[in-house]
Amino acid sequence: RQPLAIGDKKTDVVLHLAQSPTQNPEELFDVNVRSTLQLLEWAKRNGVKKFIYASAGNIYGFSTKRHRETAPFNPNNFYAASKMAAEALCWQYRHCFDINIMRLFAPYGENQQGFRLMPSLFNKIKNQEAVIINNALGNPRINPIYISDLLTVIKKVISKRGSFKINVAGKRDYSILEISEITGELLNKKPIYKMTRNKEIGDLMGDISLMQNILRFSPKISLVEGLTKFLQ
């Protein structure tokens, strides 16, 4: 594989958001792990002061409780495993510069496409395809964060000194059923549901107490407001 083509430039902060959307293990390793290592080495050579890595809440695996940053990892797919590996690499460079790891939980916003949860739900409801829920309660449950709140978090992380790992998520958790009902109401479409009993699927929620404490910030955008903006 070819190394990253990055020139030598004066840079204070690296914000690493790149990721692979595939579940192909080789591509995931190249994009999510190998390129992260190359970027870390570039940052070390060029005197970078801060390296911010966008990880994923998926590294924890499923649970009925909100995950704290100290919770054990239990990645359940190649994507989550690659994020966990990249995190481990990043943390080893904390003696070279500040390392800030943000574990994102279901971020969403305008123009979002692809494999993400919100655009997937939107397309299914719009096209009258079945939304999968895992029980009569409409689970799994998540606490998504809207893009403008995420951008505020990033700005605050950039200005905060020191190395840390934080969950980045919304204040309130919702079931897939609740999110689908709100989306259907905004689209004026009645969602179609298919209930399963898949024991391998569970809730994925992040405890944001540490984020609130370190950054002195709580998400502002409600799900209804965020989905309204998302669907415009």
Image: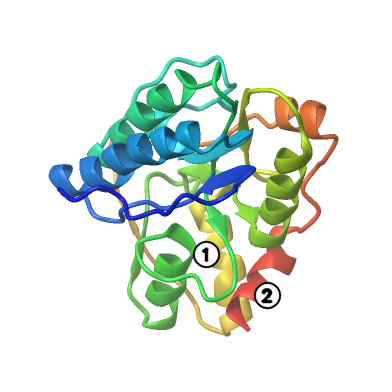
Q: What kind of residue is marked 2?
A: Thr
Quadrant position of residue 192: bottom left
Question: Could you tell me residue 183's position as x and y percent?
Answer: 57, 71
- Of 209 and 205, nearer the camera is 209
Disc 1 residue crowd, few under 14, some 14–19, many 20+, Cα 10 Å: many
- Of 72 and 28, nearer the camera is 28
- Of 186 and 229, nearer the camera is 229
Position of the C terminus, as image quadrant, is bottom right
Residue at the extreme right of the image, as rendered: 216
- How many numbered circles are shown? 2
Task: Residue 107: tell me if it is visible.
Answer: yes
Disc 2 target residue: 228
Query: In the rendered view, would you say 101 is above or below 231?
Result: above
Residue 180, which numbered label? 1
Name the secondary structure under disc 1: helix
Q: Residue at x 30, y 37 (%)?
A: 33
Name the secondary structure under disc 2: helix
Q: Residue at x 23, y 38 (%)?
A: 78
Query: In the rendered view, would you say 208 is above or below 176?
Result: above
Q: Disc 2 vs disc 1: which is toward the camera? A: 2
Task: Residue 200: tell me if it is visible.
Answer: no
Question: Could you tell me residue 1's position as x and y percent?
Answer: 14, 48
| Left or right of residue 173: residue 142 | left
Report how far apart the C-alphas of labels 2 and 1 lie in the structure: 13 Å
* Disc on the earlier residue, 2 or 1: 1
Q: Residue at x 59, y 48 (%)?
A: 10
| Residues at marks 2 and 1 touching, judged by CB atoms closer than 8 Å | no
Question: Could you tell me residue 186's position as x and y percent?
Answer: 63, 79
Q: What colouring method underlies this structural image?
A: rainbow
Q: What kind of residue is marked 1?
A: Ser
Question: Could you tell me residue 155's position as x and y percent?
Answer: 74, 49
